[in-house]
């Protein structure tokens, strides 16, 4: 290393967050990952850190339909839910910069993936089976987990989805640590992400 080089000033968390927010330039941050990965909990805190609005796509789908996701699945079937999910996410991605948490199946739709790539930076919250399972078993509102043994369902979804989730711009390991630790890691990854072209990062 050049001993004459001036050491770069270490940035505060606030400065990093501000640099990321500025570099987003109308793009969204889109959280993807399996049920239980923490997309909503982490997404809310990430939005707070970046001083951006937070939206949960599943909540928006429920508002648009006037019923819960369980009821949409039960009354109209999964295909109907997926179509609504695609439309709602496309609308949200065009609403201006925000942190958007998507349901676990959303990124499996090719049109949705293309739309996310066009309007946002995708962040995959990756987690091990045991972590996901311990979280999803705390609640019973997810229709896909009512169709069989939750462990087998989750393992199957991991096999199908992880290769596709792997297309995301950023992957962060979600695990049982304080949410703020994961938020720090996401902000650092965004700061260093070539798509954001932050000078000096
Ligand atoms: C689904 C995940 C759920 C919800 C729906 C289907 C999936 O969202 O969209 O039950 O296909 O993985 P979360 O990932 O937020 O639980």
Image (tube, rainbow, N blue to C red):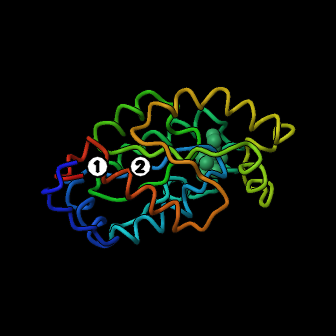
Circle 2 is placed at which residue position?
Answer: 30
Residue in the picture at 47% in, 49% down: 31
Is 121 located above or below residue 108 in the figure? below
Secondary structure under the numbered disc 1 in the rendered image:
loop
Disc 1 to disc 2, how far (Cα)? Answer: 12 Å
Around disc 1, counting alpha carbons within 10 Å, would you say few (fewer than 14), some (14 to 19), or many (20 or more)?
Answer: some
Residue 179 x/y as whole percent: 56, 66
| Residue identifier under label 1 | 94
Residue 63 percent location from the top left of the image: 52, 60
Q: Does residue 159 appear left or right of residue 109 in this picture? A: right
In percent of the image, x 41 and y 33: which residue is there? 113
- Mark 1 or 2, which is nearer the eye? 2
Q: Is residue 20 above or below residue 120?
A: below
Q: Residue at x 60, y 56 (%)?
A: 38
Name which residue lies at 67% across and 33% down: 158
| Mark 2 burial class by Cα count in 10 Å: few <14, some 14-19, many 20+ | many
**Front residue of 144 and 196:** 196
Residue 131 position (above or below residue 170): below
Considering depth in this image, is 82 or 26 the residue closer to the camera? 26
Residue 15: quarter of image = bottom left
**Of label 1 and label 2, which has the lower sequence position?**
2
Q: Residue furthest front?
A: 3
- In front of the other: 108 or 84: 108
Q: Position of residue 108 (x, y in %)?
A: 53, 31
Residue 61 is tagged as none
Figure quadrant of residue 154: top right
Dot 2: what SS? strand
């Amino acid at each position: 290393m050049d001993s004459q080089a001036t050491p770069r000033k270490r940035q505060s968390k606030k400065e990093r967050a501000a640099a990321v927010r500025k570099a987003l330039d109308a793009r969204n941050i889109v959280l993807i990952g399996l049920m239980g990965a923490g997309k909503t909990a982490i997404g809310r805190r990430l939005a707070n850190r970046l001083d951006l609005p937070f939206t949960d796509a599943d909540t928006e789908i429920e508002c648009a339909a006037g019923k819960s996701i369980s009821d949409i699945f039960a009354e109209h079937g999964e295909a109907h839910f997926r179509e609504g999910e695609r439309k709602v996410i496309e609308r949200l991605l065009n609403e201006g910069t925000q942190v958007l948490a998507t349901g676990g199946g959303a990124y499996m739709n090719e049109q949705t993936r293309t739309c996310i790539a066009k309007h946002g930076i995708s962040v995959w919250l990756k987690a091990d089976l045991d972590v996901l399972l311990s979280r999803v078993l705390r609640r019973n509102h997810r229709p896909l987990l009512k169709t069989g043994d939750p462990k087998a369902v989750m393992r199957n979804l991991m096999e199908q989805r992880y290769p596709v989730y792997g297309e995301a711009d950023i992957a962060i390991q979600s695990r049982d640590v304080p949410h703020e630790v994961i938020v720090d890691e996401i902000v650092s990854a965004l700061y260093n992400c070539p798509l954001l072209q932050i000078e000096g990062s």
